[in-house]
Amino acid sequence: MVNTPKVNPSDYAPDAHYIKAKGKRIRTRIRPRFYVGALLTTIAACLLLVFAPSAAADGTAIVGTLKGPDGAALTNVSLTVVAEGFTETVSTGADGAFRIEVPKGGKYQLSVDAATLPTGITFSKAEDQNRSILVLMGDKKVLFTFASGTDGGSTTTSSFTWARISQLLVDGLFFGILIALGAVGLNLIFGTTGLTNFSHGELLTLGAFTAIVLNELGLNLIIAAPLAIIISAILWGWGQNKILWKPLRRRKTGLIASMVVTIGLAITIRYILLLFFGGSPRSYQQFAGQSGLEFGPVSITPKSIVFAVLAAIAIAATVIWLQRSRIGKATRAVSDNPALASATGIDVERVISVVWILGAGLAAFAGIYLGSTQDVTWNMGQRLLLVMFAAVTLGGLGTIYGAIVGALVVGMFVQLSTLIIPTEMKTVGALFLMIIILLVRPQGILGRRERVG
């Protein structure tokens, strides 16, 4: 008599196909849903790349935005770039932005015509008026800091004005809501899978570029944005988990190895985007260059208000879904103890798929939000990744409320820190704040203290 090996169905993925033989469940080799999902994901990715504008059309440029100490855009300011055999003069637009196309990489002399600056605005540092710029590949972003007054001296006293502090507080609130969109998804994925996803920033970038492709194909941003969020949730969320992370989990790949995979994936996605879209910043065709609405000393553009309100609604809906819905409660159970959740009948893989879909959708929304307030670039998600990690770590790993609170704290601190440090160093302030709080409270603001031993 031949002994039939004992088959334990828990060794296999919950969605695998089984046949019954003498009361036992044996997995078959054919899994059509996997191949259909892989095929659809590949086709969609190819279509996006085919319709993507070619990188060959992009040039090299010096770009930037001029804003006063109160955050208001400086319009009609003349800037001149000079190099051997090349001279170009441009003026800033309604949003204070400028773009100067240069023929090739190299050293350029950039000067600002002080006579065209608004009355009462001067340079924080005298050397900012004439700067030597080294352009390597793609666009070179240049930052300027301005002060109130006419003496060009220190900004220590003139910077601490009620108008500027009010503007920075509002900017910090909006920035915190933006960070929360990405941080909530990042925290949900970490909570259910234990994966520290260093490619989460690229989910923002992919969402923004998906909207760019749809927008440049003729769809208004009002239609392109929600459609891009849905495509990103399915393609970059469900598809990524189905093709990459689910097979790795089935092979019991360790968390450290998986984290290394996320780093490699992030680099790969960034340079694929650079290859097909180029290094030049892009912007949505609608709602660009809006004038701000004045609320006392605070100026806010209508698109910022709309995006912030929609983002807050999306975050609140996610919290309610997590607390009240059946799949949300299952997500919390999987986050607490996956093995116990599986033993009680919860389909863990289905929960993880839903979390990836939700996380990618929120990240895509954050990318479109960021792209509407700034330019869409191939490395925009990378620049925001450390800030999102700071928010998640500061608020408490694995807690959705912690991610929200941490994001608001980081957003406020990042903006207010520009009162005393240069704008280009404001992210450093958020990371320093994270270190200080973790020294006092290692589990984060809303994290739970764990017993060891």
Image: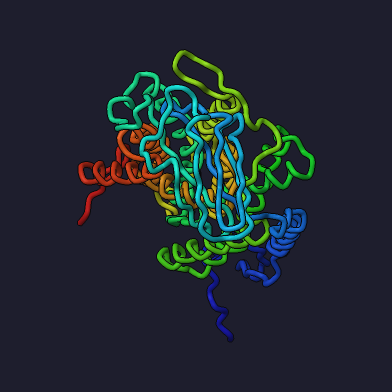
Q: Residue at x 49, y 43 (%)?
A: 111
Q: Residue at x 68, y 67 (%)?
A: 19
Q: Position of residue 342 (x, y in %)?
A: 49, 54
The answer to whether residue 41 is above or below residue 215 is: below
Q: Position of residue 51 (x, y in %)?
A: 77, 54
Asked whether 390 or 332 is in front, the reply is 390
Task: Please state, as top left, top right, bottom left or bottom right, where the C terminus lies in the image.
Answer: bottom left
Quadrant hosting residue 173: top left
Residue 203 relative to residue 227: left or right: left
Residue 307 relative to residue 428: left or right: right
Asked whether 377 or 421 is in front, the reply is 421
Q: Is residue 239 visible in this depiction of the protein?
A: no
The answer to whether residue 277 is above or below residue 329 is: below
Colour approach in the figure: rainbow
Q: Residue at x 58, y 85 (%)?
A: 2
Residue 66 relative to residue 154: left or right: right
Asked whether 341 or 172 is in front, the reply is 172
Q: Residue at x 71, y 61 (%)?
A: 42
Task: Please state, as top left, top right, bottom left or bottom right, where the N terminus lies in the image.
Answer: bottom right
Asked whether 213 or 195 is in front, the reply is 213
Q: Position of residue 259 (x, y in %)?
A: 44, 62
Q: Position of residue 131 (x, y in %)?
A: 45, 48
Which residue is at the far top? 296
Quadrant hosting residue 273: bottom right
Which residue is at the far front? 85
Which residue is at the far right? 218
Q: Is residue 420 visible in this depiction of the protein?
A: yes
The answer to whether residue 356 is above or below residue 144 is: below
